[in-house]
Image (tube, rainbow, N blue to C red):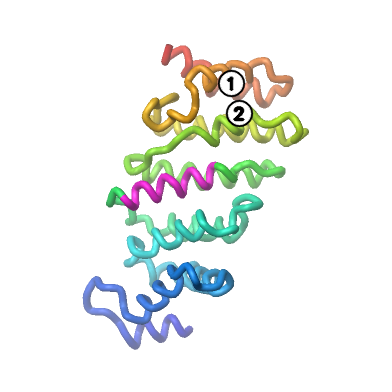
């Protein structure tokens, strides 16, 4: 109600962000602001997405940096991170345009990819869908590394049943990139991922003991490998 009052009382007649919102944004962007205050402000923006939508180009960098630099995603893409993602996606007229915003958007997507895997299949599917929506909308603005995909395809040996989840998650993310015309391997963005190791990882999944893994690997990876040889 306070936000509605401020919006009506101090309605702007131009495209400039109103003073009251500018002050909220400055507080949110200040590194010294306590985490709880930032969460409170983010929740206001989430609940009043339409009010903040005209100023998405100002708010996106701050929200994306908040997700990347805070501890919000330390245990995966939780409900709050998901709410922020849905908020940004609701601003459907916004696309990163400056080189700085494009780099930040790419870091933001790579951050989400890093935390996509989860013990529940339904949550993994939800996480992948969110990333898919961002990639479909912003693909011309994104430069994405497959570092985290390779980490999923080659999980450590001590994670038990999560190994299958990691591998299938990596394959789903790879499929999303390929469907949106990202190359299977890009030496410019994937320099940290040796090409042979990346291809070998995909081929090795054909011998995986899980039908979910080798089935997805055959469908996603191998055809593309042979097309790129």
Does the magenta run of residues contain 108?
yes
Does the magenta run of residues contain 4?
no
Q: Residue at x 32, y 56 (%)?
A: 93
Which quadrant holds residue 78?
Answer: bottom right
Q: Is residue 178 visible?
A: no
* Label annotation for residue 201: 1
Q: Is residue 114 visible?
A: yes
Q: Residue at x 71, y 43 (%)?
A: 119
The quarter of the rendered structure image containing the C terminus is: top left
* Image vertical order of residue 154 relative to residue 132, above or below: above
* Span highlighted in magenta in the image: 100-113
Label 1 element class: helix
Q: Position of residue 103 (x, y in %)?
A: 37, 47
Which quadrant holds residue 114?
Answer: top right
Badge 1 vs badge 2, beta-carbon distance below 8 Å: yes
Looking at the image, residue 162 sits to the left or right of residue 174; the answer is right
Q: Residue at x 33, y 43 (%)?
A: 141
Specify few, some or many for label 1: CA neighbours under 10 Å numbering under 14, 14-19, or 20 or more. some
Label 2 element class: helix
Q: Residue at x 67, y 44 (%)?
A: 118
Residue pointed to by mark 2:
153
Q: Position of residue 221 (x, y in %)?
A: 53, 21
* Image vertical order of residue 205 relative to residue 13, above or below: above
Looking at the image, residue 212 sits to the left or right of residue 170; the answer is right
């Amino acid at each position: 109600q306070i936000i509605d009052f401020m919006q009506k009382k101090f309605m702007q007649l131009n495209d400039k962000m109103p003073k009251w919102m500018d002050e909220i944004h400055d507080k949110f962007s200040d590194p010294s602001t306590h985490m709880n205050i930032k969460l409170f402000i983010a929740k206001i923006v989430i609940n009043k997405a339409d009010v903040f939508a005209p100023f998405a180009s100002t708010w996106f960098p701050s929200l994306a940096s908040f997700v990347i630099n805070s501890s919000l995603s330390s245990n995966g893409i939780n409900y709050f991170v998901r709410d922020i993602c849905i908020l940004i996606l609701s601003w459907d007229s916004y696309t990163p345009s400056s080189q700085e915003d494009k780099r930040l958007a790419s870091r933001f997507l790579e951050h989400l990819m890093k935390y996509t895997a989860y013990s529940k299949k339904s949550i993994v599917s939800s996480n992948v869908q969110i990333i898919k929506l961002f990639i479909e909308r912003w693909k011309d603005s994104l430069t994405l590394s497959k570092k985290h995909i390779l980490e999923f395809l080659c999980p450590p040996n001590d994670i038990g049943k999560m190994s299958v989840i990691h591998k299938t998650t990596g394959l789903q993310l790879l499929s999303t990139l390929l469907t949106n015309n990202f190359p299977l391997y890009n030496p410019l963005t994937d320099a940290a991922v040796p090409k042979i190791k990346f291809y070998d990882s995909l081929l090795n999944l054909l011998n995986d003991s899980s039908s979910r893994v080798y089935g997805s690997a055959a469908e996603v990876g191998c055809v593309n490998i042979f097309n790129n040889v």
